[in-house]
Image (cartoon, helix red, strand yellow):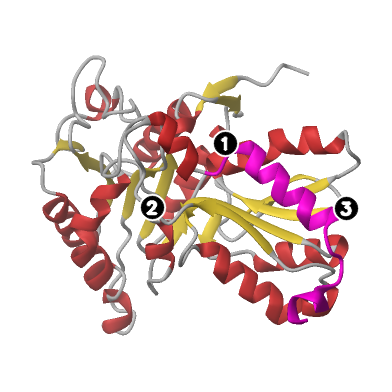
């Protein structure tokens, strides 16, 4: 059996764009510096080589105006094209919230299904070592709150390629958030990879001591921590939801039925984060199965500092995660103790 090839997260995204642009002439890419010839391809090289193959009509550099970029893409999608927008940093989503939230997310509903908005908005989230408060945020919970948007957070090169292909073929607006620390990580990606369905979580590690739900850089941290905790006899079941909208809550619920404990970990700040939504749904469905209060490990409710030393204080660290798991598994087992 031939050895499966290994590619980077960035290259997997690039392949997905190439293959979908070859398959469907209505797909085009737009964004700041996406059509730089030679060694270009945006900040992280995801669109490298596309302008050489498809030309500047299908790979379009844009002015520095996130609101204008997304508004133009909404109009293009309404006329039958399939734009894939790249915003340089996820923090700049704040500048495009009107066309994204008030237009793209609502138009199909407001026109009774007579129009479609097949738009993909790609960007990135997360801290990556000194990018400071305006280039390090994780704002996925903002977008999860908006009806009409699908929300994808791929954690591996395999998922990045398969989920992006699915996003491009979807007839609804999809926000596709990558993580800065993952672009140059490697993983197996088959030559002929098909789409990955939305709303289908992945159990990345099986275990019976506790369920952990995590994405992207936090998923990588959780898997590393699980190896250390296994030496103590703590076997974690780790789930990557892959998409927050739609959310595969059933896989999480079935896991909690087996483990009786749940910890949720994300890089977004704790207050108002998506951990609260998952925790509430688990409480609604399987409260009686819980042997301990649901726990969460999230970023502090602070802007991300420029100093890398201070950044490490704000973003969840592996020791913080391990301590939380130990408390969840070895601490008080009586859920009723919360109310005493």
Q: Locate residue 174: give its quadrant.
A: bottom left
Q: Identify the residue position indicated by label 3 in the image.
A: 208
Question: Which residue is rendered at x = 85% and y = 60% of the image?
Answer: 259
Q: Are marks 2 and 1 in contact (CB under 8 Å)?
A: no
Q: Is residue 188 left or right of residue 127?
A: right
Q: Is residue 2 left or right of residue 25?
A: right
Q: CA distance from mark 2 to mark 1?
A: 28 Å
Q: Nearer the viewer, mark 3 or mark 1?
A: 3
Instruction: Say what secondary structure mark 1 lies in.
Output: loop
Q: Identify the residue position indicated by label 2 in the image.
A: 302
Question: Which residue is rendered at x = 52% and y = 63% of the image?
Answer: 274
How many residues crowd mark 1 within 10 Å: few (<14), some (14–19), many (20+)? many
Residue at the right extreme? 233
Find residue 338 and name its label.
Answer: none
Q: Nearer the viewer, mark 2 or mark 3?
A: 2
Instruction: Say what secondary structure mark 3 lies in.
Output: loop
Q: Is residue 34 left or right of residue 118?
A: left
| In-front residue for pair 106/211 | 211
Residue 242 screen position, x and y as percent = 57, 51
Q: CA distance from mark 3 to mark 1?
A: 24 Å
Question: Which residue is rendered at x = 83% and y = 58% of the image?
Answer: 331
Of the 4 image quadrants, the one containing the N terminus is top right
Residue 15 can be seen in this image = no
Whichever of labels 2 and 1 marks the residue nearer the N terminus, that label is 1
Residue 23's place in the image compared with 283, above or below, is above
User: Can residue 319 be found in the magenta stretch?
Assistant: yes
Report the magenta residues as a range.
316-340
Q: Identify the residue position indicated by label 1 in the image.
A: 156
Residue at the left extreme? 63
Whichever of labels 2 and 3 marks the residue nearer the N terminus, that label is 3
């Amino acid at each position: 059996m031939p050895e499966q090839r290994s590619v980077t997260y960035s290259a997997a995204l690039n392949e997905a764009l190439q293959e979908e642009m070859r398959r469907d002439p209505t797909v085009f890419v737009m964004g700041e510096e996406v059509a730089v010839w030679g060694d270009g391809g945006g900040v992280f090289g995801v669109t490298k080589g596309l302008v050489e193959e498809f030309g500047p009509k299908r790979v379009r550099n844009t002015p520095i105006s996130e609101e204008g970029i997304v508004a133009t893409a909404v109009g293009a999608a309404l006329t039958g094209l399939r734009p894939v927008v790249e915003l340089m940093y996820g923090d700049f989503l704040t500048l495009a919230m009107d066309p994204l939230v008030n237009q793209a997310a609502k138009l199909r509903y407001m026109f009774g299904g007579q129009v479609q908005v097949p738009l993909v908005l790609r960007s990135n989230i997360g801290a990556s070592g000194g990018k400071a408060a305006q280039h390090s945020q994780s704002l996925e919970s903002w977008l999860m709150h908006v009806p009409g948007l699908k929300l994808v957070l791929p954690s591996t090169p395999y998922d990045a390629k398969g989920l992006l292909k699915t996003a491009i073929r979807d007839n609804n607006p999809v926000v596709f958030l990558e993580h800065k620390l993952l672009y140059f990580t490697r993983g197996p990606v088959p030559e002929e990879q098909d789409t990955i369905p939305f709303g289908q979580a992945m159990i990345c590690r099986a275990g019976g001591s506790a369920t952990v739900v995590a994405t992207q850089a936090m998923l990588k941290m959780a898997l590393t921590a699980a190896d250390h905790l296994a030496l103590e006899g703590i076997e974690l079941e780790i789930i990557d939801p892959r998409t927050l909208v739609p959310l595969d809550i059933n896989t999480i619920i079935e896991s909690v039925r087996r483990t009786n404990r749940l910890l949720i970990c994300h890089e977004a700040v704790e207050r108002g984060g998506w951990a609260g939504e998952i925790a509430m749904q688990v409480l609604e469905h399987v409260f009686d199965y819980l042997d301990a209060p649901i726990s969460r490990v999230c970023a502090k409710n602070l802007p991300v500092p420029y100093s890398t030393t201070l950044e490490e204080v704000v973003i969840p660290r592996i020791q913080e995660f391990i301590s939380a798991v130990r408390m969840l598994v070895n601490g008080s087992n009586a859920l009723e103790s919360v109310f005493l």
